[in-house]
Image (tube, helix red, strand yellow):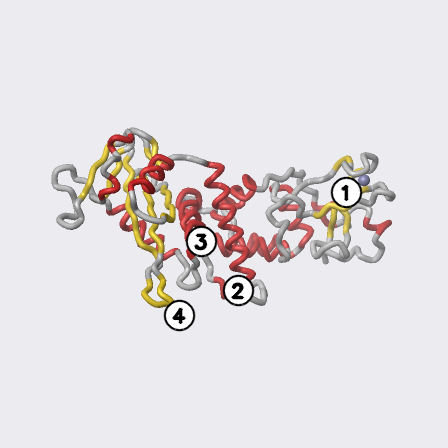
Amino acid sequence: MPFVYDDIYEFCKNRRFLIDWLQTKGLLGNFNGLCDHCSEGSLHLVEDKSYSKDGVVWRCTNRKCNKKVSVREGSWFSGSHLLLEQIVKLTYYWVYDLPNDFISRELRIGSDHTVVDWKNFSREVCLSILKLDNEKIGGPGRTVEIDESKFGKRKYHRGKRVDGVWVFGGIERETKKCFFEVVEDRSANTLIPIIKKYILPGTTILSDCWKAYSSIESEGYQHLTVNHSIEFKNKETGACTNTIESTWNAVKKSLPKTGTVKSLYDSYLIEYCIRKKYLQNTDDKFTTFLDLVKRVFPCKKRTPLTEVQLNQPTSLSQETLNGSLDLFD
Ligand SMILES: [Zn+2]
């Protein structure tokens, strides 16, 4: 069953359920076992309101050691000051493209900046996935359309001239897998290495007649061109580049309307590629994205607790933290 908002709501109602769920999913780590600090005691999950807002911490049973490890240690939640449930909801909203002002309002987060920060962090996951995949597109029998496009060209922006950036990209017709890169210029010296970096030899490459592309055939590709100044489709070869043309429109629409700085373009383009590759064709975008998160922040899983265990206070709490048993109520 695909995850819907009601499921998130259920999990987030009770922080202990949420922590258990995240631990069984491998999104929070399992540090249960011998303490590597003292090598005598073992780490157990205990309630501790004073340690962090999460309300629980992994703590060594050896009183002399008393080593504590955050439930967020090594996970993708570790750097954030937000509550776990806020992060889970924020991720759900991000995956489904809800606007920042809606998210900050719903999560009762004071400013949009926090939302923007977390979205940037989500984009870093996309970047890591792209690096982990390190997958080229195309190959024999496949067709890749390539093109360059100017992004963010506005003559005057708050009194300053904004020239925008050139983006070079390609998309495989058969699968819609794509790549994009912000480039300094559109010379062959810049574009040919990028083509070789992203496109497999033997691919049929379609492009316009830009002179930088003239050496493509000598690099081990088949090359078909269409001259946009005189035709939309090459009459002899049938070549046209409307897949990449329509992709530019979609990519430009997906970028934020304001506040985009040059250095962020790359990460927005990468987000677009990851959404296209992984999230577009699934009816459970949230779970699919969490699976990507797990690849970037792998954590040791634990087996789910039973209903009874979940309804009892976390171990050790009774003897050590008297009075804090109602933490999850
Ligand atoms: Zn210890």
Secondary element under disc 2, as helix, strand or loop, is helix
Residue 112's disc is 2
- Discs 3/2, front: 3
Whole-Å distance between the Cαs marked 3 and 1? Answer: 43 Å
4 or 3: tag closer to the N-terminus? 4
Ligand 1 picture quarter: top right
Report the amino acid beneath label 4: Arg
Whole-Å distance between the Cαs marked 4 and 1? Answer: 56 Å
Looking at the rendered image, the quarter that the C terminus falls into is bottom right
Secondary element under disc 4, as helix, strand or loop, is loop
Whole-Å distance between the Cαs marked 2 and 4? Answer: 21 Å
Crowd rating for badge 2 (residues with CA inside 10 Å; few <14, some 14–19, many 20+): some
Residue 158's disc is 4
Q: Is any atom of residue 40 visible in this view?
A: yes
Report the amino acid beneath label 3: Ser
4 or 1: tag closer to the N-terminus? 1
- Discs 1/2, front: 2
